[in-house]
Image: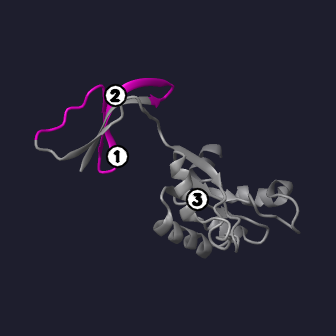
Amino acid sequence: MKTIIRSANIINEGRMFAADVLIAKGRIEKVAPQITSSKGGKHVEINAEGLYLMPGVIDDQVHFRDPGLTHKTDIFSESKAAVAGGVTSYMDMPNTVPNTLTQELLEEKYGIASVRSLANYSFFMGIGKDNLEEALRTDTENVCGITDDGLYFQNEEGILANYPDFLEKLFSRTVSASLKTELF
């Protein structure tokens, strides 16, 4: 089923203009001053005259607390609030209970989100002084990053940036093969 949004005030790339938007299979297929529908083709029309249509927001640092702290919030309630505010994608931090410091715990979060999230999602893999090898196993194609945000690096004080020797180990092991070829 296709959807045509009619006469929206579109705000995109620093400008505003009135146009129609054709959506097919969940993706924007066409933006034009006027879109004509094909004869006999089934579609839904939304009159957006006087309304604004903008790209969704990506929130690159959320703390949804799921799993382990769901008495505070959870992926469902927070993604619902995010979508209501125009956030279409989020990136969640690892400071859950337990902290997301293993591949298994990271996969658990993805499993929860696959069933309960109302928005697009990704998760940060947590890194601490004791899980360097585990963090380096993270598939960078599926995870938005590695972070110590919300976690304490050592003795409940300090952040990863305060430990240059550890950072040197981390960075020396994460330079891509293509970059090494360019640099050396």
Q: Could you say which quadrant of the image residue 66 lies in? A: bottom right
Please state if 33 lies on the left or on the right of 55 as rendered. Answer: left
* Three-letter amino acid code of the residue under disc 2: Ala
Q: 132 or 125, which lies in front? A: 125
Give SS at disc 1.
strand
| Residue at x 70% of width, y 70% of height | 99
Write the start and end of the magenta stretch as one range.
Answer: 11-39
User: Relative to 45, is 111 above or below?
Assistant: below
Q: Which callout, 3 or 1, points at the residue further toward the start of the chain?
A: 1
Q: Which callout, 2 or 3, points at the residue further toward the start of the chain?
A: 2
| Residue at x 34% of width, y 46% of height | 27
User: Dots 1 and 2: beta carbons under 8 Å?
Assistant: no
Residue 88 visible: no
| Residue at x 63% of width, y 56% of height | 145
Please state if 159 lies on the left or on the right of 121 as rendered. Answer: right
**Distance in Å between CA atoms under marks 3 and 1:** 24 Å
Residue at mark 3: 78
Give SS at disc 3.
helix
Residue at mark 2: 19
User: Dots 3 and 1: beta carbons under 8 Å?
Assistant: no
Give SS at disc 2.
strand
Residue at mark 1: 27
Q: Is residue 127 magenta?
A: no
**Distance in Å between CA atoms under marks 1 and 2:** 16 Å
Q: Which callout, 1 or 2, points at the residue further toward the start of the chain?
A: 2
